[in-house]
C-alpha cells in the first residue's frame, strides 16, 4: 500500500511542529459499519454529521454501539465499512495518533506510574515541546480545572472527581481538533455528577471544540447536548436537538428512553364514535383531537394494534370525577420526591405513572385502591404502531412546537 | 473492623471488648485468642506451619555450617585437631586465588546469562502479544527447555557438543570446515567452555523469563496504551514510557529468582564439564562441591557456602529495595 | 506550507494489516532450537547400541526398544518412576497447602516484622544445596528418614515453600478485600467467607504455582542423590548410573532421559491452559 507508506513517513513529522489552528472541524460518518466475527453487528450503517463546535451526544443502552462508534472515530477500532472524516480529512483507517483527537476514557486511562503533572504533560512531551512551554501549558490547564493543588501527587492518591479532572486536563492540554468522551461520569457520585455537568457544558462552550460524548444517562444528554443521537442495537433511532427528542420522538424507544419518569405506554385501538375519535384500551378511553389524527393515514385504521403514549407530567389527577377527567383508576403506589409526587395508579391491567406538584396533591388519599380520575393533556399525546414502534403521529403535529 | 465485629461466633465479648457480638460464646478463649478476629495474632497462626518447617530444615544446617566454618575439620584427615579457629576459614578463602577465580566466573556467568535470558524472554513475550495462529502449541514448545530436568539438559547438550560425534559439533564444525576454519571445540576448549555453558543456561531458562514476563504483559490493562496512542506516542516511546514501567513488578520477580538460581547453578555445569576443562567453568557452586566432596575440607566448604549465601542475600536485598522504591510509583 | 502539508495526510484505503511473517520466522527458529536437541535425545533412545555411538549422526535407522527393556528389566526404572511420582505429588500438595496460608497472611494483614518475615522466607531458597546436604544427611540419619519417601516428601515440601509463598503473596495482594468483607458482613464466619469467596478467587494462581512446584520437585536432583539409595530413589539420581564413565551408552541414557521427561511434559501439556491463565491473573504489584 504505497499510500499507507507515504502517509506514515509524512505523518511522522506531525509531532515536530505545533498543529495549525484548524478553523472548521466538523466530524462526518458515512455508512459506518462494524462487524465482530461473522454474526455480531455492533454498528449498523451509521450516518452522522457533527458541525464544528457542537456538543453532540451518543445516547443509548449498553450494547447499542455508541462506544464502538466513538472508538472508531478515535481510531482505536477500524471500521468494517464506511468512511470517517474529521475537518474534511479522510481519517477512516488512520491510527489514533495521526488524527489529532483527544479522549477521556470511562476508567480515565491515566498513567498509574506518573504524577498528575507528568500525566498531563505526556502529550506535550511526545511533541517535544520545551520544558518551560510544557510547564506553562500544564499549569494553565490545571488552573482551569482546579487541580493545581494535587499536581505532584500520583493517581492512587486522588479521589474519583480529581481523577476525572486530570483525564480531562490531559485531553485539553494539546489543542486537539475533536474531543471524545466515553462515559466519563459513570464513576462519580450523584452530586459531583450534577456539578460536572454544568462545568463541562460551560467548558465546552468556552473552548469551542467539537465534542462527542457517549453516555447511557439520558439526563446528562438532555442537559448538556446541542444535539443527541439515540442509538439502539447499532442503529440510529433519532438524531436531533434535545428538545426535539423529548417532544417529537421518532419512535417508542426514544420516547421511553428519554424523560424521567418514563412515558406511559398503553396498548389501545382507535375507535370512531359519533364523529369523535377515541383511543380505547382495557380499562380506559381517551378522546383524541381529530386534527392531528388526520395527519396520519395509518393512525386512523381501527384494526391496527397501537400504543398510546403520554408523559407522567402531562396527566392531571383528581380525587373526584370532574369534567374531562375521563380515566378512572385506583391508587397503587405513591412516591413523594419533594417538589412533586409520583402516583402509580391502576386502570384495568395498566399501571400508569402520574407526576403532579406536591402543592396540589398533598392531601390525596393514598390508600391502596383509593379511587382517582385522570385527564391526559390532549395536546401531549403520542400514537405508536405496536409492531414497528414508530411514532405514527402526535398531538404536536397539529400545533407549532413551542420554541 | 465492622465486618469482624459482626461475626461474633467464636469470640468472647468481654475479651474482645466489643459488646456488639450477637452470639454467645461457644468455645473457650483460645479460639478467640488465635482466631480470625485477633488481627494481630491470627496472621502468625497462618504462617506458623511455614515458619516451623522452614526453621526446622533451615536453622540446624545453618548453625551447623556456622560451627563447621569456625573450626577446621577436614573429613579425610580425622587426625587433625579440631579446634576453634574463629574467622580463619573466611580469611583463608579471601586469600585463596581459587576463590576469586570461581567468583569471577560465577559473576560473568550470572550477569551474562541473566542479561541474555531477560532480553530474549522479553522479546519473545512481546512477540506473543500479537494475534498469532497456533499459540498454544508454540507456547509449549517454547517452554520445553524449562520443563526438562536440568540434569537432563546438561546431558543432552553434552551429547550435542560431544567432540566429533555430537550433533552440533558435527554440523557446525562441518559448516565451518568448509571455510577452512578448524572445528570449534566448544566444551573441550578452555576459552569456549564458559560461553557454551552460558549458552545452555540461556537455552534452558529463557522460557522462564518469557513465562513471567508474558503473564505480566497480559495483566497490564489496555487503556493506558490507548490513551498513549491518542496522545500521539510512537510504539517505541510507548514501550519505554508505558510498558516497561508497568511491567516492573514482573521484572523484579523474574530477575530476583533467576539471578539467585543462576548464581547457584550446579547440575548442568557439573554434568557437562565437571568444572573443566581445567578450571575454566568452575563456578562457586561447582568449586564448592569439589572442596566439600573431593577434598573433604568440610570447614572450608561450610565457610564458602555461608559466604555465597551472604552474597545472594545482599544482591537480592539490593534488587528488592531498588525495585520497590520504583514500584511504589507504579501501583 | 510544510505545516499544512503534514495535515494533508490521507488515510490508506484499507486498514493496515499486521504483517507477521517475520514473527513466525523467529518463532519457528526458536521452536527449532528448543525442540531439536530434545528430539535427538528421543531418537537416540530408540537406537541400538551400535548406532548410538557412531561418529556420524544417523537420522534414519531401525528403531528398537532394547534400551527401554534394559532399563525396565535390569534397572527397575519403573520403581524410580513410582517414587518420583509419589514424592513430587505429595510434596507439591503439602507445600502449596501450607504456603497458601502463609502467603495469605503476608498479603492481607499488616503487622510488625512483615517485610522481614517475607524476606526471611525467601532467603531459605538462597542456600546452595551442596552446603546443606551434610547437615540434612545427619538429621535424616538420626531420624531414620534416609532412603525413605517420607523423608524426601518432608524435605521437598520445605524446599518449595519459599517459592510458593513468594509467588502467591503477589497474587493475593491483587484480590480486593471487599469480596471477603461483604461475605463476612453477610453473617459468615471468617472461615466460611474464606472458603466460599476467597479460595475460588485464588484458585487460578494456586493452580499455576502448583504446576511450577510440581515441575521443580520432579526435577530435583542434588538432595535425592545423597538422601536415597535403593528403596526410594527417584528418577533424576538414577540417571547418574548411566551418565558417567568413559563408555557411556547413549541409547540407554536417552531412554532414561525419556523416562524422566515424558511424564512431566505430558502433564504440562494437559494443564497448560489453566497454568497460563492462572499466571496471567495478575503478577506482583
Image: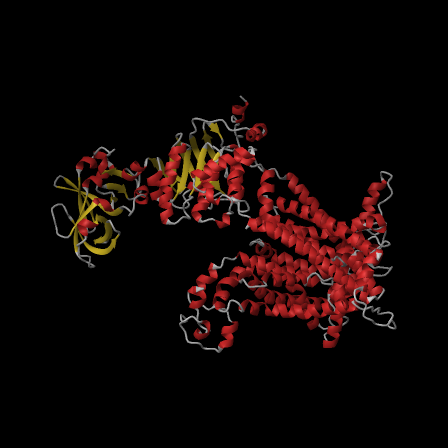
Identify which residue, C273 or B99, lies in the foreground: B99
Q: Position of residue A258 (x, y in %)?
A: 31, 43
Number of disc labels: 0
- Picture quarter with the N terminus of chain B: bottom left
- Would residue C275 be found to the left or right of residue A291 on screen? right
Identify which residue, C218 or B285, lies in the foreground: B285
Identify which residue, C124 or C92, lies in the foreground: C124
Q: Position of residue C231 (x, y in %)?
A: 74, 72
Residue occupying the point 65% across, 41% down = C23
Looking at this rendering, what residue extends furthest in the top direction? C1
C115 vs A377: above or below = below
A115 vs B270: above or below = above
Q: Position of residue A354 (x, y in %)?
A: 23, 49
Q: Position of residue B255 (x, y in %)?
A: 66, 52
Residue occupying the point 27% across, 42% down = A384
Residue A202 in view (yes/no): yes
Residue occupying the point 21% across, 34% down = A398
Applied colour scheme: secondary structure
- Write down the quadrant of residue C172 in the picture: bottom right
- Would residue C205 be found to the left or right of residue C124 on screen? left
Residue occupying the point 56% across, 70% down = B45
Residue B226 in view (yes/no): no
Amino acid at each position: 500500500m504505497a499510500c499507507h507508506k507515504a502517509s506514515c513517513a509524512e505523518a511522522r513529522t506531525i509531532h515536530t511542529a505545533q498543529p495549525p489552528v484548524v478553523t472548521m472541524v466538523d466530524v462526518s460518518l458515512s455508512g459506518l459499519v462494524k462487524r465482530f466475527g461473522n454474526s455480531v453487528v455492533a454498528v449498523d450503517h451509521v450516518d452522522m454529521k457533527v458541525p464544528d463546535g457542537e456538543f453532540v451526544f451518543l445516547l443509548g443502552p449498553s450494547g447499542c454501539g455508541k462506544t464502538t462508534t466513538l472508538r472508531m472515530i478515535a481510531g482505536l477500532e477500524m471500521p468494517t465499512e464506511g468512511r470517517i472524516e474529521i475537518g474534511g480529512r479522510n481519517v477512516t483507517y488512520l491510527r489514533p495518533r495521526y488524527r489529532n483527537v483527544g479522549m477521556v476514557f470511562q476508567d480515565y486511562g491515566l498513567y498509574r506510574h506518573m504524577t498528575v503533572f507528568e500525566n498531563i504533560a505526556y502529550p506535550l512531551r511526545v511533541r517535544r515541546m520545551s520544558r518551560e512551554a510544557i510547564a506553562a501549558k500544564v499549569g494553565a490547564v490545571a488552573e482551569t480545572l482546579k487541580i493545581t493543588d494535587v499536581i505532584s501527587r500520583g493517581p492512587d492518591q486522588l479521589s474519583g472527581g480529581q481523577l476525572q479532572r486530570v483525564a480531562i486536563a490531559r485531553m485539553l492540554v494539546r489543542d486537539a481538533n475533536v474531543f471524545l468522551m466515553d462515559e466519563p461520569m459513570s464513576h462519580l457520585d450523584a452530586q459531583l455528577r450534577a456539578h460536572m455537568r454544568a462545568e463541562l457544558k460551560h467548558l465546552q462552550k468556552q473552548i469551542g471544540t467539537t465534542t462527542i460524548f457517549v453516555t447511557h444517562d439520558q439526563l446528562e444528554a438532555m442537559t448538556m447536548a446541542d444535539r443527541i443521537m439515540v442509538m439502539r442495537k447499532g442503529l440510529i433511532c433519532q438524531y436531533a436537538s434535545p428538545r426535539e427528542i423529548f417532544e417529537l420522538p421518532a419512535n417508542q424507544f426514544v420516547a421511553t428512553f428519554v424523560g424521567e419518569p418514563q412515558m406511559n405506554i398503553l396498548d389501545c385501538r382507535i375507535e370512531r364514535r359519533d364523529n369523535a375519535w377515541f383511543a380505547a384500551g382495557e380499562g380506559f378511553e381517551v378522546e383524541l383531537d381529530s386534527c392531528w389524527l388526520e395527519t396520519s393515514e395509518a393512525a386512523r385504521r381501527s384494526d391496527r394494534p397501537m400504543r398510546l403514549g403520554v408523559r407522567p407530567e402531562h396527566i392531571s389527577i383528581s380525587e373526584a370525577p370532574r369534567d374531562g377527567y375521563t380515566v378512572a383508576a385506583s391508587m397503587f403506589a405513591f412516591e413523594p420526591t419533594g417538589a412533586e409526587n409520583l402516583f402509580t395508579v391502576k386502570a384495568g391491567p395498566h399501571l400508569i405513572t402520574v407526576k403532579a406538584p406536591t402543592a396540589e396533591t398533598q392531601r390525596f388519599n393514598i390508600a391502596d385502591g383509593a379511587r382517582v380520575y385522570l385527564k391526559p393533556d390532549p395536546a401531549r399525546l403520542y400514537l405508536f404502531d405496536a409492531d414497528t414502534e414508530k411514532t405514527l403521529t402526535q398531538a404536536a403535529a397539529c400545533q407549532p412546537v413551542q420554541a | 473492623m465492622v465486618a469482624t465485629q459482626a461475626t461474633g461466633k467464636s469470640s468472647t465479648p468481654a475479651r474482645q471488648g466489643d459488646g456488639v457480638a450477637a452470639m454467645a460464646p461457644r468455645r473457650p478463649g483460645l479460639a478467640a485468642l488465635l482466631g480470625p478476629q485477633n488481627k494481630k495474632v491470627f496472621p502468625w497462626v497462618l504462617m506458623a506451619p511455614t515458619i516451623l518447617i522452614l526453621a526446622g530444615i533451615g536453622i540446624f544446617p545453618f548453625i551447623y555450617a556456622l560451627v563447621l566454618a569456625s573450626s577446621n575439620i577436614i573429613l579425610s584427615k580425622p587426625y587433625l585437631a579440631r579446634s576453634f579457629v574463629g574467622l580463619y576459614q573466611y580469611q583463608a578463602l579471601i586469600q585463596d586465588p581459587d576463590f576469586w577465580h570461581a567468583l569471577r566466573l560465577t559473576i560473568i556467568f550470572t550477569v551474562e546469562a541473566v542479561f541474555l535470558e531477560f532480553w530474549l524472554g522479553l522479546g519473545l513475550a512481546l512477540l506473543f502479544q500479537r494475534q498469532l495462529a497456533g499459540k498454544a502449541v508454540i507456547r509449549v514448545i517454547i517452554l520445553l527447555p524449562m520443563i526438562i530436568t536440568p540434569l537432563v539438559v546438561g546431558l543432552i547438550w553434552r551429547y550435542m557438543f560431544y567432540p566429533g560425534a555430537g550433533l552440533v559439533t558435527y554440523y557446525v564444525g562441518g559448516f565451518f570446515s568448509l571455510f577452512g576454519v578448524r572445528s570449534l571445540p566448544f566444551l573441550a576448549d578452555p576459552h569456549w567452555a564458559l560461553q557454551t555453558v552460558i549458552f545452555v543456561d540461556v537455552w534452558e531458562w529463557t522460557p522462564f523469563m518469557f513465562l513471567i514476563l508474558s503473564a505480566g504483559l497480559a495483566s497490564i490493562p489496555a487503556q493506558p496504551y490507548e490513551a498513549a496512542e491518542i496522545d500521539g506516542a510512537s510504539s517505541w516511546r510507548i514501550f519505554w514510557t508505558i510498558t516497561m514501567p508497568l511491567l516492573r513488578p514482573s521484572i523484579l520477580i523474574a530477575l530476583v529468582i533467576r539471578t539467585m538460581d543462576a548464581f547457584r547453578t550446579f547440575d548442568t555445569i557439573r554434568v557437562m564439564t565437571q568444572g573443566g576443562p581445567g578450571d575454566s567453568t568452575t563456578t562457586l557452586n561447582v568449586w564448592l562441591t569439589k572442596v566439600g566432596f573431593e577434598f573433604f575440607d568440610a570447614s572450608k566448604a561450610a565457610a564458602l557456602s555461608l559466604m555465597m549465601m551472604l552474597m545472594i542475600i545482599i544482591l537480592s536485598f539490593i534488587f528488592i529495595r531498588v525495585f520497590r522504591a520504583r514500584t511504589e510509583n507504579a501501583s | 506550507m510544510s505545516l499544512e502539508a503534514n495535515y494533508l495526510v490521507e488515510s490508506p484505503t484499507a486498514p493496515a494489516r499486521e504483517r507477521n511473517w517475520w514473527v513466525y520466522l523467529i518463532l519457528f527458529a526458536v521452536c527449532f532450537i528448543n525442540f531439536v536437541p530434545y528430539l535427538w535425545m528421543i531418537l537416540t533412545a530408540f537406537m541400538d547400541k551400535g548406532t548410538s555411538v557412531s561418529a556420524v549422526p544417523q537420522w534414519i535407522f531401525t528403531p528398537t526398544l532394547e534400551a527401554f527393556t534394559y532399563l525396565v528389566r535390569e534397572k527397575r526404572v519403573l520403581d524410580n518412576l513410582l517414587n518420583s511420582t509419589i514424592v513430587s505429588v505429595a510434596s507439591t500438595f503439602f507445600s502449596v497447602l501450607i504456603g497458601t496460608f502463609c502467603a495469605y497472611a503476608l498479603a492481607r494483614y499488616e503487622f510488625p516484622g512483615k517485610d522481614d518475615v517475607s524476606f526471611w522466607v525467601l532467603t531459605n531458597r538462597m542456600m546452595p544445596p551442596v552446603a546443606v546436604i551434610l547437615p540434612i544427611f545427619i538429621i535424616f540419619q538420626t531420624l531414620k528418614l534416609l532412603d525413605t519417601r517420607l523423608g524426601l516428601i518432608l524435605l521437598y515440601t520445605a524446599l518449595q515453600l519459599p517459592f510458593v509463598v513468594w509467588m502467591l503473596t503477589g497474587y493475593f495482594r491483587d484480590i480486593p478485600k471487599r469480596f471477603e468483607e461483604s461475605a463476612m458482613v453477610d453473617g459468615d464466619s471468617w472461615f466460611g467467607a474464606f472458603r466460599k469467596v476467597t479460595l475460588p478467587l485464588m484458585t487460578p494462581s494456586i493452580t499455576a504455582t502448583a504446576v511450577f512446584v510440581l515441575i521443580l520437585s520432579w526435577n530435583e536432583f542434588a538432595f535425592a542423590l545423597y538422601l536415597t539409595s535403593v528403596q526410594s530413589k527417584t528418577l533424576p539420581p538414577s540417571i547418574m548410573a548411566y551418565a558417567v564413565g568413559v563408555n557411556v551408552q547413549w541409547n540407554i541414557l536417552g531412554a532414561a532421559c525419556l523416562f524422566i521427561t515424558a511424564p512431566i511434559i505430558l502433564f504440562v501439556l494437559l494443564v497448560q491452559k489453566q497454568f497460563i491463565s492462572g499466571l496471567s491473573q495478575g503478577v506482583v504489584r
